[in-house]
Image (spheres, rainbow, N blue to C red):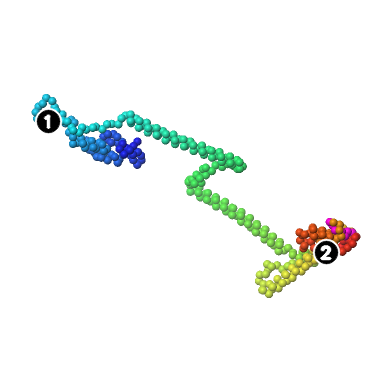
Amino acid sequence: MACTICTKSFGFFNKEHGCPVCKFSFCSGCLKYKLVRDGKKLNVCLRCSKLATTSDFSPKKDAKVALTHPTPKAVKPESSNPTVLPTEPDDDELIRNKLEALKATESDELHAAATEEDVPKVSSDNVDIEKRLAALKGLEYKDYKDASQRFMGSDNRTEEQKVQDLLGQFVEETKLINVMDGKRTEQDEEIAKRLQALKEFPTGSGAALVEGGNSKPTVLPDSDSDEGLTDEELARKLAHRYAEEGKLEAKLSLESETEEIMPTPGSNGAEELPWCTICNEDAVLRCRGCDNDLYCSACYKEFHYDEDPQEHQTVPFKGGKGTQLV
């Protein structure tokens, strides 16, 4: 529906008002003219206001002219401006307007119902897709739709329940802290035991093996006992330590050379052919890194070009047929 004069649609900010004279619908801006009728002040439309104003100056319809002389017939006055009474709206038009309003309301309700039905379908489709995706990944499907409501919901617990929950949380945290402290203590004790075992491990065991086990292992001075020593005592202690380490290295190198020179068991008295291990040519050198195998110069270069020279040291070979291993 709209205003009869300005055709503005009625709504929340534009209320519908009816003219008490012509019964048409108007807005508050068009129904601003004042009219006094039967001792009451009325707000009427412009048309009714003009009609009432012009009718006040024109002779009344029912008024009779006073005659000075008796006449057989009463003469009715003729008005130059006949008044036109406002016509009431047609019943067909009112019915038509009401039908249009009902149709518009029904269409809005149907549209709202259709949108509400589509929302669950879309949500159900999404849930189906999420379930299939979880099944493909081999995971368990979990519905997180109401998670925000669960986490952001109001706390309905009483004060006593809150205190009990807080105390329970404190007890659990204390137990967890005690367990972690116990594990750390066990780890620290194990590390301390390992360090003590390393400190007590004799560093002169290699020298004792070289001497046949008759000599006692050389124990180097402990560097942890340097606290409280003067500079002179500390220098003397370091010099003694370096001297002992040098002696130990010399003994270990002597042991390695002895092991290289010593023949393998069961090879004493065995004849060694003075030929190259690969091509049977006359051998010219012996490789210490290859179990004292004999090689000619060509085969040695071919098969030792990418080897470390320190690991494959050579010794000149001078011998004839039937030479024994040394």
Instruction: Give the camera-side residue of 245 and 162.
Output: 245
Residue 87 is marked as none
Position of 111 with respect to 200 (left or right) is left
Q: Quadrant of residue 7?
A: top left
The single residue placed furthest to the left in the displayed view is 69
Q: CA distance from mark 1 to mark 2?
A: 169 Å
Specify few, some or many for label 1: CA neighbours under 10 Å numbering under 14, 14-19, or 20 or more: few
Q: Residue shown at 24%/40% (left/top)? A: 34
Does residue 55 show up magenta in the picture?
A: no
Q: Residue shown at 76%/65% (left/top)? A: 204
Residue annotated with mark 1: 66
Residue annotated with mark 2: 315
Q: Amino acid at mark 1?
A: Ala
Position of 200 with respect to 144 (left or right) is right
Instruction: Give the camera-side residue of 77 and 264.
Output: 77
The single residue placed furthest to the bottom in the displayed view is 232
Residue stretch in magenta = 271-278
Does residue 274 show up magenta in the picture?
A: yes
Q: Amino acid at mark 2?
A: Val
Q: Regarding mark 1 in the picture, which secondary structure is present there? A: loop
Tell me the quarter of the image containing the N terminus.
top left
Tell me the quarter of the image containing the C terminus.
bottom right
**Residue 235 location (% of width, % of height):** 69, 73
> Which one is earlier in the sequence, the residue at label 1 or at label 2?
1
Q: Regarding mark 2 in the picture, which secondary structure is present there? A: strand
Q: Residue shown at 57%/52% (left/top)? A: 173
The single residue placed furthest to the top in the displayed view is 72
Q: Main secondary structure of the magenta part?
A: loop
